[in-house]
């Protein structure tokens, strides 16, 4: 079949999302057979993916999808900011996040979601956008009774945060989610290593302690004074990187701990931040 019409090209483009010229070439090569043309385009996408797989991916976006008591955050990288802002790319990462809610993010590229094998979905989008696109990492959570997930994605889609907030009783979930989202927004704007001091990574604390000791030695003060200086500065450092003790970005006159206590009093409940997850480009 040599008479390939514009309507046929348009229909194949709507089905596959491939470019007009690619669709025309596929239909021509396959004599107008739509199924064969779709396979032709899929193989072309695989070839493009193989060719571009070694190219560096420094840009990208983060997408969070929430559903009932579940949420998934995915971090997907591409080569240029131009593609990161592309609507087709944004739709793609949203689709991947939607599937990650159900299948999880561990070994995501080896899994199949509602749209088919995840790996093939990446091959397809690489073929359409012409850049190397890779899944970097992510998180999938499901919370139980009296807990909600607060999610926040910064407007540039470069920072994403999940916060699990637990209440000591059953309350209006929408209000609880609003509070959790406010905490997530704070985490997005701040340097946070742990919820509270006893959760801090010992290696992070030890690294800071060594730095403070080296810094204090330059002062020329006696050893016993240096020890007190380091201990005081280390305690200050710990509070600065723990979520509960930080000044809440929307109300700097109170800490996150105070914000949660105040909101709890208004509702008649007590809130506990169980965990948080932050990722960014």
Image: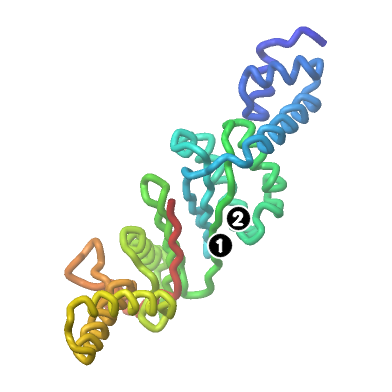
Q: On the image, numbered disc 2 is attached to which residue?
A: 100
Labels 1 and 2 touching (C-beta < 8 A): yes
Query: Of 270 and 107, which appears nearest the observer?
Result: 107
Mark 1 and mark 2: span between their CA atoms? 7 Å
On the question of residue 50 being in view, the answer is: yes
Q: Badge 1 local density, few (<14 within 10 Å), some, or many (20+)?
A: many
Q: Position of residue 155 (x, y in %)?
A: 36, 46
Q: Earlier in the sequence, mark 1 or mark 2?
A: 2
Q: In this view, which residue lies farthest toward the top?
A: 3
Q: Position of residue 86 (x, y in %)?
A: 48, 34
Task: Please give the name of the residue rendered at 64% of the width and 17% of the height, measured from the top-left corner.
Answer: 21
Task: Please give the name of the residue rendered at 34% of the width and 78% of the height, measured from the top-left corner.
Answer: 210
Q: On the image, numbered disc 1 is attached to which residue?
A: 140
Q: Position of residue 195 (x, y in %)?
A: 38, 75
On the question of residue 266 being in view, the answer is: no
Task: Please give the name of the residue rendered at 59% of the width and 31% of the height, measured from the top-left corner.
Answer: 130
Quarter holding the N terminus?
Answer: top right
Q: Secondary structure at mark 2?
A: helix
């Amino acid at each position: 079949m040599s008479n390939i019409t514009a309507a046929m090209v348009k229909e194949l483009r709507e089905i596959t999302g491939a470019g007009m010229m690619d669709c025309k070439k596929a239909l021509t090569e396959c004599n107008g057979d739509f199924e064969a043309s779709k396979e032709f385009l899929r193989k072309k996408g695989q070839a493009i993916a193989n060719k571009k797989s070694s190219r560096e991916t420094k840009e990208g976006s983060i997408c969070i999808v929430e559903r009932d008591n579940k949420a998934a955050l995915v971090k997907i990288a591409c080569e240029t900011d131009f593609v990161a802002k592309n609507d087709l790319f944004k739709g793609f990462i949203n689709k991947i996040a939607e599937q990650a809610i159900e299948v999880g993010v561990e070994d995501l590229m080896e899994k199949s979601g509602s749209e088919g094998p995840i790996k093939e979905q990446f091959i397809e989008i690489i073929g359409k956008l012409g850049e190397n696109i890779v899944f970097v990492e992510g998180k999938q959570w499901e919370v139980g009774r009296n807990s909600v997930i607060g999610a926040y994605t910064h407007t540039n889609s470069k920072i994403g945060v999940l916060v699990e907030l637990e209440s000591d009783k059953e309350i209006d979930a929408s209000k609880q989610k609003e509070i959790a989202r406010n905490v997530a927004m704070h985490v997005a704007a701040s340097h946070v290593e742990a919820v509270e001091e006893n959760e801090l990574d010992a290696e992070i604390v030890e690294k800071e302690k060594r730095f403070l000791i080296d810094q204090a030695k330059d002062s020329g003060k006696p050893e016993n004074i240096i020890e007190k200086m380091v201990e005081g500065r280390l305690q200050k450092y710990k509070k600065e990187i723990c979520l509960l003790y930080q000044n809440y970005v929307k109300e700097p006159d109170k800490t996150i701990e105070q914000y949660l206590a105040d909101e709890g009093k208004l509702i008649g409940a007590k809130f506990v931040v169980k965990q948080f997850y932050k990722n960014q480009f």
